[in-house]
């Protein structure tokens, strides 16, 4: 049973989730300040962190399974179940990891939802603005050769031979 390895993986997961939270806050700042130039870059950085988390999750699941078997737990136990079954001092440490991960995930969900609302609100505002834009019309010409739109603009014919 390698409790230390699992604990190290959990620390690394907390670091990555904390970095992801930071990147999400950066994204929110960019959205709020209108610095959309950097949104593609921050989206890429977030994707890199998510890839690292996916890889770490596989390793953590394998380490958790190995410990679960030795503790007599069923397949695919939660971290809370491992913490409850682990001997001291690991039970306390795993419980603290569990609490810290819950806080980080909750904060990430809140920030992600807020960012999504900001983006959707911005897209809605752009859509509304586009609907209110009136496209200029060239108007048509009447039998006298004059424009029928009655506006301040009139058609001009230029002779290239001048």
Image (cartoon, grey):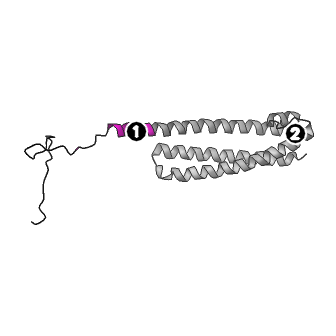
Q: Earlier in the sequence, mark 1 or mark 2?
A: 2
Name the residue: 14% across, 50% down. 155
**19 left or right of 135?**
right
Q: What segment is highlighted magenta in the picture?
A: 123-139
Against 160, residue 157 (above or below) is: above
Residue 41: in magenta span = no
Which residue ends up furthest to the bottom in the rendered image? 161
- Horizontal and vertical percent position of residue 2: 88, 47
How far separated are the C-alphas under marks 1 and 2?
Answer: 53 Å
Residue at disc 1, secondary structure: helix
Question: Which residue is identified by label 2?
Answer: 68
Question: Residue extending furthest front?
Answer: 143
| Quarter of the figure with residue 21 | top right
Q: Position of residue 99 (x, y in %)?
A: 74, 35
Quadrant of residue 123 within the rendered picture: top left
Q: Report which residue position mark 1 lands on.
A: 127
Q: Is residue 146 at all visible to an observer of this figure?
A: yes
- Residue 92: quadrant of the picture: top right
């Amino acid at each position: 049973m390698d409790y230390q390895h699992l604990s190290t993986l959990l620390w690394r997961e907390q670091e990555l989730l904390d970095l992801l939270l930071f990147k999400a806050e950066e994204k929110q700042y960019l959205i709020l300040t209108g610095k959309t130039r950097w949104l593609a870059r921050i989206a890429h950085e977030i994707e890199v962190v998510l890839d690292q988390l996916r890889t770490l999750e596989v390793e953590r699941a394998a380490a958790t399974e190995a410990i679960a078997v030795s503790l007599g737990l069923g397949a695919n136990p939660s971290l809370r179940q491992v913490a409850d079954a682990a001997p001291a001092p690991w039970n306390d440490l795993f419980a603290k990891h569990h609490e810290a991960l819950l806080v980080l995930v909750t904060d990430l969900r809140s920030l992600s939802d807020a960012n999504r609302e900001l983006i959707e609100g911005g897209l809605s505002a752009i859509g509304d603005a586009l609907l209110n834009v009136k496209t200029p019309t060239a108007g048509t010409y009447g039998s006298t050769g004059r424009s029928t739109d009655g506006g301040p603009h009139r058609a001009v014919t230029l002779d290239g031979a001048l």
